[in-house]
Amino acid sequence: ASAHAVADGDAGTGCADGVAAGGDTSAAAAATALLLSWPPSSSPAGLLAVRRFGGGLVVLIGDRGRWTGCQGLHEELAHHWEEVWRLDILRWPHMEDDVRVFRRRH
């Protein structure tokens, strides 16, 4: 496995509308993290969790959007979060599983 520092996440189109973004900017909130492990692609659950989360870091374990997270989740991360770290993990053949860490953009 290898770790990578990166600049941006992937973009996509939305899958859920009308959810207000959170955003507690206190130092304590900025130091908290949300862990999403294989959020479903058929549900906006991951998108809703990220939008309602008030902390500063999101840790996403998955396959970069093929089966993980709806398109709206990936769009949210691309527009409002900066990918700051990535680690390739063990995976099934032909999959692109990794752990990615995103920091909230200011």
Image: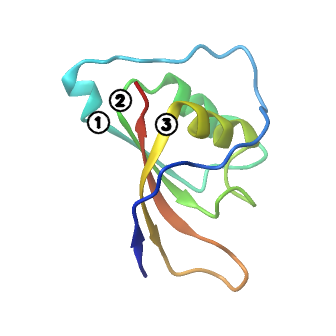
Considering the numbered disc 3 on the image, is that residue within a helix, a strand or a loop?
strand
What residue is rendered at 64% in x and 59% in y? 64
Give the residue furthest to the bottom. Answer: 93
Residue pictured at 62% horizontal, 33% vertical = 76
Q: Amino acid at mark 1?
A: Thr
Measuring from the top left, give residue 87's x and y in whole percent: 43, 69
In front: label 1 or label 3:
3
* Residue 35 sits above or below residue 92 on the image: above
User: Mark 1 = which residue?
Assistant: 32
* Residues at marks 1 and 3 touching, judged by CB atoms closer than 8 Å: no
**Residue at image point 75% right, 60% down:** 66
Question: Separation of disc 2 and disc 1 at Cα?
Answer: 5 Å
Amino acid type shown at disc 2 = Gly
Total tally of numbered discs in the picture: 3
For residue 103, which numbered disc appears in the image? none
Q: Residues within 10 Å of mark 1 (few under 14, many from 20)?
A: few
Residue under label 2: 55
Tell me the residue that label 3 is attached to. 81
